[in-house]
Image (cartoon, rainbow, N blue to C red):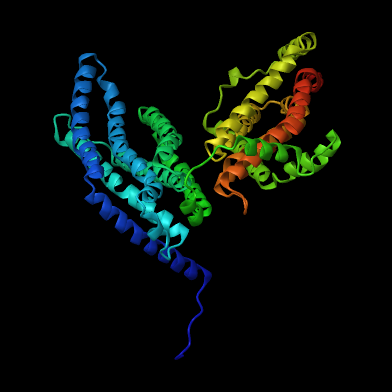
């Protein structure tokens, strides 16, 4: 009917909002890219790496091929040749890190930041626009470099024609790595007060990305593992989403303009940590500390604990499925109950006569949880989830082998449940605290800076570790060495 307007659905409204955000972000991108192409100090290194490095790589490839052929290692060439296209693509992309570090703090030092922040663009639009601008020139140069190198191999004397799937994998990895480095660098640029500080903090990005390239190289030379290269971009895209979310949330125009230098206030750091560790009420006894500080901190881990449990269950199921694909030979499974009983009796006697085994079991668990917590800081908590889920994947794999071999599962259940009733909650709590510690920077509570939110999360992690996780791990270690073997022995006794 004339004059009738069909109401818009929420999906249409969302799509229109996304298009508007991208359109406004591209305004900033066009301005930045135009300025980059005008600056010879930016374009000269990009062109040098794009044109010279692929030619140098082609020459080195010819030397490698001659060396391999002369030493009878020619069959290894198909596995090694894909390495250099990935490295050739990574070098120009690494320049995006330098450009991205200049996005906000460089504008501030050039006194051109205030007019930019005065525009009616949202924080997300500014962040995305700057990120796209920092990524596009180096990424295009990377694609060109890969094309020159692969073209030299295809049309040159080597006559190597890479599979199209391999080329797509290399291009995909190069693109996603550029996204990770740029989005992370823009966050650093918006939170620092000088390019010197930004360049120093960039090591927290370039070092992990360089290690990732090494891991990709190890996978690349093993053709049967190259399917993993389809999985890595998914994890990197999650990292990009976290960086974008964090950058848009913690971006503060007034603070960016008003802050001229960052001071390291050790007194404030110590006071904030101590207040969070003791609790706001300042507990005067151990019972009051647990009631007013420890238990509230544990209750705040609801969502991270749920995510940790979900990952543990998924790991157990994944291990079970993996057992069907890689079954163990049945003759490697111990089926002699008498021999199992003898092994358990020896373990029990050893544990009774050597209490140090309890310390060994406790120490191993604490080392793994400490490493998981440390890695969580540099991975938004994801590496902590992987480490704490790994034992559940192993358990799923072994249980599936037991069922496939037709063995009685009761002894194997008895070998896990007694101490697992105490150890598993400790692992879940430690994993949840580490996940919260690593991910708190992506969404700090309202009214808190990133530093304060992380410092308080660190205090909660230490508090939960000392007050809850450590006692549970100690009890689990004693049960594992002294009680579990007896229960398994009882389950195996006819």
- As rendered, which of 331 and 172 lies closer to the eye? 172
Q: Position of residue 353 (x, y in %)?
A: 79, 8
How many marks do you count on the picture? 0
Q: Is residue 134 visible?
A: yes
Q: Position of residue 96 (x, y in %)?
A: 34, 43
| Residue at 78%, 10% in the rendered image | 349
Q: Where is residue 409 in the image (x, y as percent from the top left)?
A: 71, 28
Q: In which quarter of the image is the C terminus?
A: top right
Q: Can residue 174 be seen in this view?
A: no
In the image, farthest residue toward the bottom = 2
Left/right of residue 457 with respect to residue 92 in the rendered view? right
Q: Where is residue 329 in the image (x, y as percent from the top left)?
A: 56, 22
In the image, farthest residue toward the top = 353
| Residue at 78%, 25% in the rendered image | 475
- As rendered, which of 109 and 469 lies closer to the eye? 109
- As rendered, which of 275 and 404 lies closer to the eye? 275
- As rendered, which of 486 and 423 lies closer to the eye? 423
Left/right of residue 129 with respect to residue 400 in the rendered view? left
Name the quadrant containing residue 492.
top right
Q: In this view, does 72 lie above or below 193?
A: above
Left/right of residue 223 with respect to residue 243 in the rendered view? left
Name the quadrant containing residue 341.
top right
Left/right of residue 56 with respect to residue 297 in the rendered view? left
Q: In this view, does 234 lie above or below 27?
A: above
């Amino acid at each position: 009917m004339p004059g009738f307007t069909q109401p818009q659905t929420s999906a249409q409204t969302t799509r229109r909002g996304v298009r508007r955000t991208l359109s406004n972000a591209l305004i900033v991108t066009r301005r930045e890219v135009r300025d980059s192409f005008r600056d010879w100090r930016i374009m000269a290194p990009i062109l040098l790496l794009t044109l010279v490095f692929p030619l140098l790589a082609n020459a080195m490839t010819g030397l490698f091929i001659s060396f391999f052929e002369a030493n009878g290692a020619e069959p290894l060439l198909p596995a090694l040749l894909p390495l250099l296209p990935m490295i050739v693509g990574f070098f120009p992309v690494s320049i995006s890190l330098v450009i991205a570090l200049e996005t906000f703090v460089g504008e501030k030092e050039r006194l051109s930041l205030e007019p930019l922040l005065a525009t009616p663009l949202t924080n997300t639009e500014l962040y995305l626009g700057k990120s796209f601008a920092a990524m596009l020139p180096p990424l295009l140069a990377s694609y060109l470099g890969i094309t020159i190198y692969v073209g030299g191999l295809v049309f040159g004397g080597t006559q190597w024609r890479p599979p199209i799937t391999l080329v797509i994998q290399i291009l995909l990895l190069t693109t996603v790595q550029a996204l990770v480095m740029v989005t992370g660098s823009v966050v650093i640029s918006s939170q620092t007060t000088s390019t010197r500080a930004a360049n120093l903090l960039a090591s927290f990005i370039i070092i992990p990305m360089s290690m990732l390239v090494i891991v990709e190289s190890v996978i690349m030379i093993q053709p049967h593992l190259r399917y993993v290269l389809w999985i890595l971009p998914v994890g990197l895209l999650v990292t990009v989403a976290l960086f974008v979310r964090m950058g848009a949330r913690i971006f503060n125009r007034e603070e960016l303009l008003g802050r001229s230098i960052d001071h390291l206030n050790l007194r404030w750091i110590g006071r904030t940590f101590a207040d969070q560790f003791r609790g706001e009420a300042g507990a005067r006894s151990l019972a009051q500390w647990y009631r007013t500080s420890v238990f509230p901190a544990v209750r705040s881990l609801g969502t991270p604990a749920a995510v940790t449990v979900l990952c543990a269950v998924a790991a157990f199921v994944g291990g079970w499925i993996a057992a069907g694909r890689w079954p163990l030979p049945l003759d490697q499974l111990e089926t002699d109950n008498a021999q199992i009983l003898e092994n358990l009796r020896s373990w029990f006697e050893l544990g009774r006569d050597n209490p140090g085994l309890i310390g060994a079991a406790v120490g191993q668990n604490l080392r793994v949880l400490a490493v998981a917590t440390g890695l969580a800081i540099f991975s938004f908590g994801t590496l902590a989830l992987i480490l704490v889920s790994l034992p559940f994947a192993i358990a799923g794999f072994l249980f599936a082998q037991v069922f496939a071999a037709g063995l009685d599962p009761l002894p194997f259940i008895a070998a896990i449940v007694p101490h697992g009733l105490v150890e598993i909650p400790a692992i879940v709590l430690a994993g949840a605290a580490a996940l919260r510690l690593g991910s708190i920077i992506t969404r700090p509570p309202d009214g808190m800076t990133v530093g304060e939110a992380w410092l308080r999360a660190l205090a909660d992690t230490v508090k939960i570790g000392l007050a809850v996780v450590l006692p549970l791990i100690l009890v689990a270690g004693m049960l594992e060495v002294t009680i579990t073997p007896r229960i398994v022995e009882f389950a195996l006794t006819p």
